[in-house]
Image (tube, coloured by chain):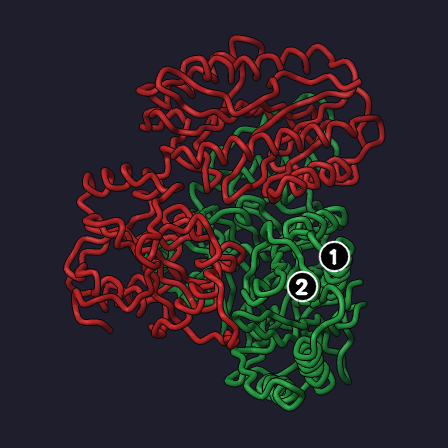
Chain colours: A green, B red
Amino acid sequence: MQPEGSSKPSASRAAGSARSPTLLNAERLKAVMKAEGADAVVATSAENVTYTSGYWALSQWIRRGPQIYVLLPAADLAASEIIASTTLLDQIADQDDVWVENVSRYGYFQVDRSNAPLDALDRRQAELYALPDQGDAIEALVSAIRAAGLSRSRIAIDEMGLLPGHWEKLRDKLPDAKLVAGFQLLRRVRAVKTVEEVARLKRVAAITEASIDAALALAREGTTESEMARAFHGCTISHDAFPVIGCIGFGTRAAMPNVQPSSTRLKPGEVIRFDVGGRYKHYRADMARMAVLGEPDGKTAAYARALHVGVLRALEMIKPGVKASLVFETAVEAVRREAIPHYSRSHVGHGIGVDGYDLPDLTAASRDVIEEGMVLCVETPYYELGWAGLQVEDMIVVRGDGIESLMTSHGSLRVMR
Amino acid sequence: MQPEGSSKPSASRAAGSARSPTLLNAERLKAVMKAEGADAVVATSAENVTYTSGYWALSQWIRRGPQIYVLLPAADLAASEIIASTTLLDQIADQDDVWVENVSRYGYFQVDRSNAPLDALDRRQAELYALPDQGDAIEALVSAIRAAGLSRSRIAIDEMGLLPGHWEKLRDKLPDAKLVAGFQLLRRVRAVKTVEEVARLKRVAAITEASIDAALALAREGTTESEMARAFHGCTISHDAFPVIGCIGFGTRAAMPNVQPSSTRLKPGEVIRFDVGGRYKHYRADMARMAVLGEPDGKTAAYARALHVGVLRALEMIKPGVKASLVFETAVEAVRREAIPHYSRSHVGHGIGVDGYDLPDLTAASRDVIEEGMVLCVETPYYELGWAGLQVEDMIVVRGDGIESLMTSHGSLRVMR
């Protein structure tokens, strides 16, 4: 353990190579920390670690357990520090998104070193491997907090990524600090996107739309849901994105909210519902489109139109300052008025970013207010057991005077012939 | 809340449709529960929910937060119960793997119902939606525990899937129960696979090998790591599996343990290292293969041979009753003797199943003992900064008198011309 405020046992990039955060909304983080009186924030969950530092640590993303943290001091964000296991240091060196310079490592992991001259990437790795071993994740975090002079401060710790017992350990090892839950604080920060985040969300939306087109290109009698899923995900992969949600259902199966593709074959007149979205450079898509094989019957056409109108009315009114609850009411009322008087919903959308459910929540009870720079999924799903499911879900970014759609396709019912 | 031991507020399948678990090793679960004096186990993390009940709940697998539980009473596993949010009930009805009949639901979610006659799948869904709303996940779990007459029992609760504060809530609401951490108990159970699990692991291993072949088919001067990754994941998708690990690195980049594909182009004489594996029907692959473009130099050839021999020696000695620590020593010693005297490792493998790191741990300090039915990844990675990384990792299943390999390809260095 380091004496309070001592020089940090961490590796920094060479002078002159300082980077700025591109994913983290640094100004908003500072404002939210100030409003909540937090002297520091510690990110612990996969989404928050990547969001705050740019560091995507493979094992943390594929299973629960691996502990990676980012300590962000309010007084000087440039002094932020990544705490990582030795096994994952290579990714800090190799990832362009990583802007945090200070790193602490913990745990044994063997990487040998050749006598050959090292290139810049390998030099940075060698520097990181040469750091002292801080023992375990919690010890390393406590050392970093002490070294930053924060051991008597108010620290908002993202509680979602810690393992059972970790919070208590931190409390015991930092008896003079005031530890408060930080997950919601970071969720508030994440709600308003940076330019780079919007660019990635736009890209993943485009990839997902292309993937829907690839799947619909197979729409004919006898095609299975699984065949469409393969075409969908295959297209996503071909654009360097990764599958996350792939709900594709035909006919009555489309009434299952989470329908997973099966060997069910498409029949004439049946609806095809997509609720889908991959991940591109860590950023998520979530959108819904609906189609029908051949002419829709009257109910299908009317309901599909009503759901689409619900989304359109919501999009027309979304701008900075509007209450999320009003967006909810507007969408639901529009659907009811158009054609589905019994339409009822828990929400009509949500934010999206590095997580699939960012703020705001578009619910009746939401106290969120729309802000410029939010990226939203606006949706009006309808599920009717024994009949079908229909859904429109658009991704949009909130601009100063309204919205910019991230979609290139229209949300109306597509008739496949 | 239900009175203790009352009839359960849950939906059961129609009589005669009872299913048996195919993923869960029920006999082993009973034995481990008996040995640990657990009257019941509660699965809470995504892996354990799917493993114990066969239920794969989409949202629980893609983000941290959604709470799904499985209550498994030692006295009668057939009385096990799934606790699920209303939003995810459709998947219980639609998934063939689900063998647990009793379900409790919590939370509002709107699904309408047509007047048309329902098929069996929709009837089951209607039955589940008609269950009373138990409020929230913890309330629903507490009700289920009370209704099962377990409120004064010793209950092993998988602590890894709960949210912060949940453990304390359970303790407060079940003051007469003895709650103990259950994650490790379930990990012990999962270590020995069922016939169906081995079949899935064999399948995902084959898909991953085919995907490596698809990537290596592009091995020529100028091919990028990303191009190989697209071919790799595209092949995985075409076989209905999903990407999880895709470390593919060339030359000095192959020395990064977690190398993520980049625009780096392959050069003659360079090594290509794969540490990869998808997920098929919830089951993971994790394997490593190595190749070189053109003739390998002497060091590459010798080191690759040594690492392969390390795995082969380990595989030769693996059989029921052998200590995991001895497997570790054998592999490391073999590599040292062959060509890399300084070879040093934290582990030479691990179990694999619904999680990528099941028991046993093949480490020097491991107290695990090899058992029949375990599925192992046996590996000897070597990372040398400034030179390259090489790795062999085979998936195998332990049989009564040795091993059966799940691999179809040889682990030696492949020379690509």
Q: Quick one: label 2, few (<14), some, or many (20+) residues within 10 Å?
A: many
Discs 2, 1 touching: Cβ within 8 Å: yes
* Residue at 23% from the left image edge and 68% from the top image edge: B172
Q: Secondary structure at mark 2?
A: strand
Residue A272 marker: 2
Classify mark 1: residues with Cα within 10 Å, few (<14), some (14-19) or many (20+).
Answer: many
Residue at 60% of width from left, 49% of height from top?
A263
Q: Note whether residue B193 is visible.
A: yes
Tell me if B201 is positioned left or right of B29 in this view: right
Q: Amino acid at mark 2?
A: Ile
Number of on-image labels: 2
Q: Mark 1 belongs to which amino acid?
A: Ala
Rendering coords of residue B95 (x, y %): 47, 53
Residue in front for this viewpoint, A371 or A174 = A371
- Residue A335, picture quadrant: bottom right
Q: Position of residue A155 (x, y in %)?
A: 46, 66
Residue linked to disc 1 = A219
Estimate the x, y position of residue A183 in percent, counting from the top left: 49, 66
Is B199 placed left or right of A78 in the picture? left
Compared across the picture, whether A64 is left or right of B147 comes to: right
Tell me, yes or no, if residue B346 can be seen here: no
> From what the image shows, is residue B98 above or below residue B104?
above
Quadrant into which the N terminus of chain B falls: bottom left
Mark 1: secondary structure: loop
What residue appears at the point 38 percent right and 52 percent down from the top-left corner?
A: B160
How far apart are labels 2 and 1 at the CA level?
9 Å
Q: Which mark is first along the chain, 1 or 2?
A: 1
Residue A152 in the image: above or below residue A327: above
Q: Position of residue A173 (x, y in %)?
A: 35, 55
* Residue drawn where x is 62% and y is 64% of the image: A251
User: In the figure, residue B279 lies in which quadrant?
Assistant: top right
